[in-house]
Amino acid sequence: MDPLRIGIAGLGTVAQGLLEILHANSSEITRRAGRSLSVVRVASRSPKPSVDLGTADFSTDLSTLHDADIDVVVELIGGEDTALQLVRDAMAHKQSVVTANKAIIARHGNELVADAGREGVMLGFEAAVAGGVPIVNALTRGMVGNRVQWIAGIINGTSNYILTAMADHGSTFAAALQEAQGLGYAEADPAFDVEGVDAAHKLTILAALAFDTDFRFDAVYTEGITHITTEDIEYARELGYAIKHLGIARSSQDGIEARVHPCLIPRNCMLANVDDVMNAVLVHADAAGPTLYYGAGAGARPTASAVIADLVAMARGDAVDFKVGGADHGALNMEQVETAYYLRVPSLDEPGVFARVATILSEHAISIEGAIQRERAVHVDTSASWVPIIILTHRVREHVMTSALKAVQALPEIVGEIMRIRVEQLD
């Protein structure tokens, strides 16, 4: 068969990893694909003479990727606007597309899937979620005979590294972030990662594939990790939990909930033991039961590995023909989501405070599963002594907890902001 002719947009670390693997493993890839994969052109804003392009041409003009001699455009430039236009133009020129760009799939996936179908081309985005972890393939092929009930995943390596450093070394959030930046795991502006936006993009994609619904990035509740303290991590450990930044999607009769936020999970849970920059996705389905997908969530070679998986599928002619939006699932508002909660209530060191807090929770039909109340007082600026009251609750809807905490916060004995972190058993 004729080679699959590839044009690559971008010459960053992932593109370089892709070129290296295609060269190093060319015989294996050709045998598995049934034809060779040939990079005929690379387009980037600036040349990198030190990078071996093989026999490929180089251009600083992205539009040259739409020449008739290119079958597939691989988008690795990142960002949103230019990348989105490149993908649209490729499809309009009857070219298939492979992208590692989670943002354009999460935000524009409905349009792009429709465009691919209309133009009779293929769209691959395995590399857009969890790097080298083949979770897109697992959901669209391995789980095709299942009804997925829920997904929970650690899908941002930066946040996971920071929480691991805080848990293992007692680092503050600021110190752990600085360490992550020094190692190249976090950007100079880390907001995209630590505020949960990156994970929300990925969860949008996972939810659409798992539940056969539209890509609904705007429906994902998103909360970061900047407010997590080492104190909370220690209390969680004492209670038998770890704190992880999770993306959770669940299907119920009320609709699909999709949320990204810090979470207490049992220490014996598989996800609780995923540390540093690693990613993992736990899928619970009716037939297969729980399955875990674990690996490097970023990096040149893991991400390039996922790109090659899509290219080989296209070379074989058996790439997934995505059909999202087939099921009529509504999006569940976060206020209607039901979880258990960890509460840290800073209160004056006076008799009866815990009883008053417990009474308010009881009045809102919130049951307490466990509690810790320290005898040791902490002195604050007002010279008043206070202690943290730690409470674990049973499951309750978010809006009920919000109402209860508003009443607790109004007590005169409460001397600071109440911390709440959701708790998931993942069973």
Image: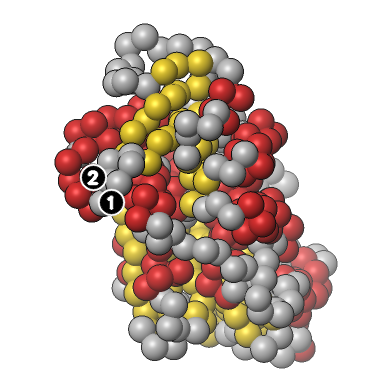
Rendered image: mark on residue 406: none
- In which quadrant of the rendered view does residue 104 lie? top right
Say whether residue 146 is left or right of residue 31: right
- In which quadrant of the rendered view does residue 165 lie? top left
Residue 154 visible in rendering? yes
Horizontal and vertical percent position of residue 417: 71, 57
Answer above or below: position of 283 versus 10.
Answer: below
- In which quadrant of the rendered view does residue 207 lie? bottom right
The residue at the point 65 percent across, 76 percent down is 326
- Residue kind at label 2, given as amino acid type: Thr
Say whether residue 320 is left or right of residue 62: left
Answer above or below: position of 307 versus 341.
Answer: above
Dot 2: element: helix
Horizontal and vertical percent position of residue 90: 60, 38
The residue at the point 45 percent across, 83 percent down is 146
Estimate the spatial distance between the alpha carbons at disc 1 and disc 2, rounded to whole Å: 5 Å
Say whether residue 360 is left or right of residue 312: right
Horizontal and vertical percent position of residue 123: 53, 52
Could you say which is closer to the camera, residue 195 or residue 20?
20
Q: How is the image coloured?
A: secondary structure
Could you say which is closer to the camera, residue 136 or residue 123?
123
The residue at the point 40 percent across, 12 percent down is 48
Q: Are marks 1 and 2 in contact (CB under 8 Å)?
A: yes
Residue highlighted by disc 2: 30
Label 1 neighbourhood size at 10 Å, few (<14), some (14-19), many (20+)?
A: many
Residue 359 visible in rendering? no
Label 2 neighbourhood size at 10 Å, few (<14), some (14-19), many (20+)?
A: some
- Residue kind at label 1, given as amino acid type: Ala
As drawn, the residue found furthest toward the left would be: 27
Q: How many marks?
A: 2
Could you say which is closer to the camera, residue 261 or residue 390?
261
Rendered image: mark on residue 33: 1
